[in-house]
Amino acid sequence: MQSHILSNNVLTDNILLIADKGKIFKGGYIAIVKEYYFQNAWSDKEVITKFRKLERMKKHIAKYYKEFETDNLTQE
């Protein structure tokens, strides 16, 4: 499994998880984005977005994380 940091936050980082080639996550997903939003001073709210296709995941990342480069993201 590959993991990439999408953005650095104060408490937690938004991360991208991509399954290795020939493998998938439970439920048939190949990529998962874990995003954290401010909840209070001690914790963040976690929002998990799952993807079954790399193209859909790349569109999501391009829309919300413009500074993150998606050209080299593949299942390896």
Image (tube, rainbow, N blue to C red):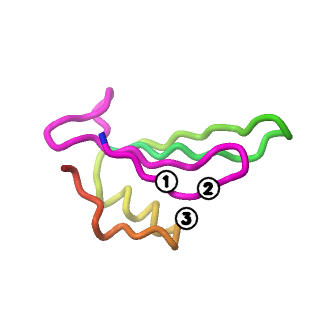
Q: Residue 72: horizontal and vertical position, in percent?
A: 28, 66
Q: SS for tag 3?
A: helix
Residue at which label 3 appears: 64
For this orientation, the residue located farthest to the top is 26
Picture residue at 14% right of the left edge, 39% below the top = 22
**Could you say which quadrant of the image residue 70 lies in?**
bottom left
Of the residues tagged 1 and 3, which is closer to the observer?
1
Picture residue at 55% right of the left edge, 64% below the top = 64
| Circle number at residue 16 | none
Q: Quadrant of the N terminus?
A: top left
| Circle number at residue 5 | 1
Of the residues tagged 3 and 2, which is closer to the observer?
2
Q: SS for tag 2?
A: loop
In three-dimensional space, the C-alpha distance between marks 3 and 2, rounded to whole angstroms, equals: 14 Å
Q: Are marks 1 and 2 in contact (CB under 8 Å)?
A: yes
Q: Say whether residue 21 is left or right of residue 54.
A: left
In three-dimensional space, the C-alpha distance between marks 1 and 2, rounded to whole angstroms, equals: 7 Å
The numbered mark, 1 or 3, whose residue comes first in the sequence reads 1
User: Callout 2: 10 Å neighbours few (<14), some, many (20+)?
Assistant: few
Q: Residue 40: horizontal and vertical position, in percent?
A: 84, 39
Q: Residue 7: horizontal and vertical position, in percent?
A: 57, 58
Q: Disc 3 residue type?
A: Tyr
Q: Which residues are magenta?
A: 2-29
**Could you say which quadrant of the image residue 74 lies in?**
bottom left
Q: Disc 2 residue type?
A: Asn
Q: Disc 1 residue type?
A: Ile
Residue at which label 2 appears: 8
Q: Are marks 1 and 3 in contact (CB under 8 Å)?
A: no
